[in-house]
Image (tube, coloured by chain):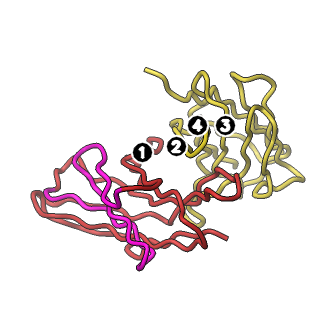
Chain colours: A yellow, B red
Amino acid sequence: DARVTQTPRHKVTEMGQEVTMRCQPILGHNTVFWYRQTMMQGLELLAYFRNRAPLDDSGMPKDRFSAEMPDATLATLKIQPSEPRDSAVYFCASGLVLGKNTEAFFGQGTRLTVV
Amino acid sequence: AQSVTQPDIHITVSEGASLELRCNYSYGATPYLFWYVQSPGQGLQLLLKYFSGDTLVQGIKGFEAEFKRSQSSFNLRKPSVHWSDAAEYFCAVGAMDTGRRALTFGSGTRLQVQP
């Protein structure tokens, strides 16, 4: 049963610390998305990659956030330094974009709490 | 820019009653449209999608949705709701003419099912 795997599921950290969230996309998928979910803002797109290249990261605060795909089986989202306002659930999704197919499969998310 | 409006933040229905969740989108061309469901503490699961063709699409768990271009709507329906349908439902739109395959989500509708 193919699925998107995110680690860790939960993370509590102190303000100022570095946080790294990891995502293993579904094997064979060529597109990876990072979304952030909060009560106030709902689901916001932070970044997405096609064939490991960043296509759009305009939704990401550049001064503290960075997203990478070191290889096709791993995507990372890093926050340095973290702040309390970064507390949210971060979702990774992957999809196989071929022609008109743009379906995204979501992981279970990383719940981040910055105290 | 693409956008999605889900006018109902919270809906309560009785088990066995019919359901309709509203979704309106804004986009200049024909969009990709999706409905996702999120159970507490879980990621998003795709219920159904519309790309082209028949405007009435069938999804999983007995859900269906109808694309109405004239009304810019993509409402989700189910003829008889089960207690297990209690969750949050998200409508999403993705552009198909710019190559940008990311999804923009609505703010969600929380469904409560009364026994």
Let me know if residue B69 is in the magenta part: yes
Crowding at label 4, few (<14), some or many (≥20) Cα neighbours within 10 Å?
Answer: many
**Marks 3 and 4, how far apart in space?**
5 Å
Secondary structure found at label 4 = strand
Q: Which residue is mark 1?
A: B46
Please give the residue where the numbered disc 4 appears in the rendered image.
A95
Whether labels 4 and 2 share one chain: yes
What's under tag 1, amino acid-wise?
Leu
Residue reaching furthest front? B53
Q: For the view shown, which residue lies furthest in the bottom direction?
A: B71
- Callouts 4 and 2 close, C-beta under 8 Å: yes
Write the residue at 36% across / 62% down.
B110
Q: Residue reaching furthest right?
A: A63
For the residues marked 3 and 1, what is the alpha-carbon distance in whole angstroms? 17 Å
Residues tagged by mark 2 and mark 1 found on one chain of the structure? no
Identified at 83% across, 43% down, the residue is A66
Tell me the kind of residue under disc 4: Gly
Q: Which mark is residue A103?
A: 2
Q: Position of residue B39 (x, y in %)?
A: 37, 46
